[in-house]
Image (spheres, rainbow, N blue to C red):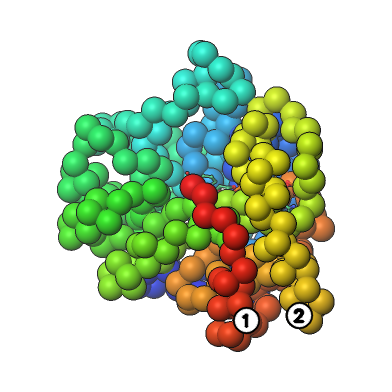
Amino acid sequence: METRILGKDLKVSAIGLGCMGLSHANGAPTEENEAVRLLREAVEDGYTFFDTAETYGYKEDPHHNEKLLGKAFSGMRGKLVIATKFGVWFDYSENEYHPKLNADSRPETIRKSVDESLKRLNTDYIDLYYQHRVDPNVEPETVAEVMSELIKEGKIRHWGVSMASEDYIRRAHAVCPLTASQNVYSLIAPDESLFSTFEELNIGLVSCCPIAKGLLTGAYTKGQEFEQGDYRRGSAWFSDETMDKTQPLLDYLTQLGKEKNATLGQLSLAWMINKKPWIVPIPGTRKSSRLKENAGAGDIRLTAEEVAGIDAAITIGTT
Ligand SMILES: NC(=O)c1ccc[n+]([C@@H]2O[C@H](COP(=O)([O-])OP(=O)(O)OC[C@H]3O[C@@H](n4cnc5c(N)ncnc54)[C@H](OP(=O)(O)O)[C@@H]3O)[C@@H](O)[C@H]2O)c1
């Protein structure tokens, strides 16, 4: 697969793999051997960029996902780029299927998190360490200062933020330069308001939920049932209203797909990587065939007119 650069020098596959769904937010977790097999298969398919978080897990095993990566990538660490995240924890006490998210980026919490993540990931460095959510009680400068120390100590190599505002990004970047920002960005959530900031500061955009949890692939229909613990259950993205509004866009992509010999999911990913060289989507899947399909999006070339044509076909903007 082709590669691209995030920030100054972090080289990653043009399509990364979002690993969350193997352990969290997609219903019951994937059986461990099956998940490890899939992660190794992704490496064979050309993925070198893997996204996890300390908090991707479930009530009985809250850090399941990092441990999976640690097991799967033993012996091949050097050729991979592992991104993980700190700064949030899930409270499973009220709702074990959709736990409450709490922010905590106190320096002492970050230091504990990084050491535990390193152990679970079975590595002595993290390539890209994101603050998962802004903590309203901790200044960006304080977090950035800790990142600067962790880089000096060799525990992390780059850092990033997720869902942070322009002001937060600028203040954090001034203390310790950011490599990437991970935000929801897709054809149904096409917010580009931070693009000029990313370009000015040379910060990459890692797009999470790049195919809108599967909605943009056309594989899901109205009335689809999702199991307990699957965040799509009751989600506005999968409401009849959103599906109706999205249909004309999917029809457009279906037509274009015939010309480009591409699936809807591939075009949704190709749209963003052909738009800017510093955007890297990280679609997630539990299926081998979809791993390959999504990786194939990295090879699709779209002209500026084709990208603009897809932009013009966008029918909905959600968050
Ligand atoms: N920073 C944050 O706060 C944040 C928030 C959300 C997500 N993320 C990151 O972003 C990654 C991706 O997000 P996501 O998994 O929520 O959403 P996504 O990548 O937009 O969609 C994943 C869903 O789409 C389905 N899918 C994948 N490829 C498909 C294909 N080719 N055809 C049809 N269906 C397909 C998958 O089902 P199957 O498994 O059945 O294939 C899965 O349920 C996560 O793994 C996580 O690393 C970060």
Q: Quadrant of residue 40?
A: bottom right
Q: In the picture provided, is 176 more to the left or to the right than 120? A: left
Q: Position of residue 127 (x, y in %)?
A: 43, 57
Foreground mark, 2 or 1, reads 1
- Give, as a three-letter code, the residue at label 1: Glu
Q: Position of residue 179 (x, y in %)?
A: 36, 63
Residue, x 74% and y 76% (percent of image)? 256
284 lies above or below 9 = above
Question: Does the rendering let one see residue 121?
Answer: no
Q: Quadrant of residue 23?
A: top right
- In this figure, which residue is indicated by the disc labeled 2? 260
- Give, as a three-letter code, the residue at label 2: Lys
Q: Position of residue 319 (x, y in %)?
A: 49, 47
Is 177 in front, or is 207? 207
Q: Is mark 1 within 8 Å of ligand 1?
A: no
Q: In the picture provided, is 108 more to the left or to the right than 210? A: left
Residue, x 58% and y 51% (percent of image)? 209
The 10 Å Cα crowd at callout 2, few under 14, some 14 to 19, many 20 or more, is some
Q: CA distance from mark 2 to mark 1?
A: 10 Å
Q: Give yes or no for contact between labels 2 and 1 (Cβ–Cβ under 8 Å).
A: yes
Residue 306, numbered circle: 1
Disc on the earlier residue, 2 or 1 = 2
Residue 275, numbered circle: none
**Tag 2, which secondary structure?**
helix
Question: Does the rendering let one see residue 20?
Answer: yes
Residue, x 57% and y 25% (percent of image)? 98
Q: Quadrant of residue 116?
A: top left
Residue, x 17% and y 48% (percent of image)? 141
